[in-house]
Amino acid sequence: MKILLFGKNGQLGWEFQRLLPILGEVTALDRDELDISDMQAIQKKIEELKPGLIINASAYTDVDLSEKEIELATKINALAPGVMAEMSRKVGAAFVHYSTDYVFDGRQGSTYKESDSTHPLNMYGKSKLAGEENIKQAGEAYLILRTSWVYSLRGNSFVNKVLKWSRQNRNLKVVNDQISSPTWARTLAEVTSFVLAKHKKDLYAEICERSGIYHLTGGGFTSRYEWARQILANDPARSEQIVQAIEPASSEDFPTPAVRPLFSALDCTLFEEKFGLRLPDWRDTLQLAMTG
Ligand SMILES: NC(=O)c1ccc[n+]([C@@H]2O[C@H](COP(=O)([O-])OP(=O)(O)OC[C@H]3O[C@@H](n4cnc5c(N)ncnc54)[C@H](OP(=O)(O)O)[C@@H]3O)[C@@H](O)[C@H]2O)c1
């Protein structure tokens, strides 16, 4: 099977590059090889390659900058996924795409199911929701996997930021009123790959039968503050930390251009039941990611 991966150098894309060769012959692209804000370039590449599976790990993920770069965020998060879904249908490819807990406003007070009403508070969430809608309109065999608080041990992830702050500051303040589920990029790629491998024999038909939106995150939920505490506790080079105290703060103490939902944890029961998989608790996964 030919596989086309967009966004190969992102947190998730990087992990997919390690896993996908087990499933088939992979063409993995980064921005320099194909700019997904160019719809014609997407169409041309898919027509040329005629893959059996397309995975979109690319996205405009700068939540605050999305408030300014609305047009670009819309192209990347809303229009491109629609074109990918349409082209997937044309060439008979299964299509996997990722969305976000930020399609919700966080005011429900309990974990969100797929059937709950969306109401994004910021442009990032709006553009991702429009991407979901465009895929549903144009696609046939697709999985839209909504996830949250994706981290890796590479680049500028929250885990690496907390580790960096702990080496520069004696006191840290982290918000404790934002609650969701930390999700290791590797787990996300692995779980997705399990699903694809399980249905590989007749992938298009199998995914077609299960097409839709699913919630897929690390198990359980927590606040950013507690997440940061666990990051410090799992730090394999703890002697390098100079931090002495970590204090809970309110989102109001750290005004940002984009408003974030406060309680946006997702209920992943549908995914677990439909695909017969169990999503490991975020704490266990974090420990594995940092010390394994
Ligand atoms: N990160 C989170 O906390 C989070 C939370 C919920 C949902 N999600 C969703 O999960 C998925 C994976 O997220 P992630 O954290 O792995 O994202 P990421 O690390 O920011 O990676 C996104 C990738 O997309 C690429 N990209 C951006 N614009 C592009 C363009 N015009 N053409 C081609 N490539 C482009 C980026 O390339 P450059 O490196 O060149 O910019 C980067 O490699 C996304 O759909 C995201 O919306 C993420």
Image: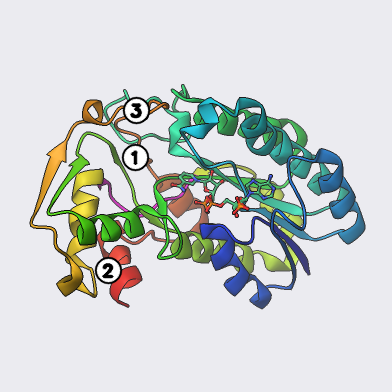
Q: Is the distance from the Cβ of mark 1 to the nearest ligand 1 atom less than 8 Å?
A: no
Does label 2 or label 1 sit earlier along the sequence? Answer: 1
Image: magenta residue range = 215-223
Residue placed under numbered mark 1 in the picture: 265
Quadrant of residue 173 in the image? top left
Please, is residue 23 above or below residue 46 in the view?
Answer: below
Q: Main secondary structure of the magenta part?
A: loop
Residue placed under numbered mark 2 in the picture: 287
Disc tally is 3
Seen from the viewer's position, the closer of residues 91 and 223 is: 223
Q: Residues within 10 Å of mark 3 (few under 14, many from 20)?
A: many
Residue placed under numbered mark 3 in the picture: 106
SS category of the residue bearing label 3 = loop
At label 1, which amino acid type do we have?
A: Ala
x, y (%) of residue 51? Answer: 82, 60
x, y (%) of residue 125? Answer: 50, 30
At label 2, which amino acid type do we have?
A: Gln
Residue drawn at 67 percent across, 52 percent down:
207
Q: Can the viewer see residue 17 in this picture?
A: yes
Quarter of the figure with the C terminus? bottom left
Q: Residues within 10 Å of mark 2 (few under 14, many from 20)?
A: some
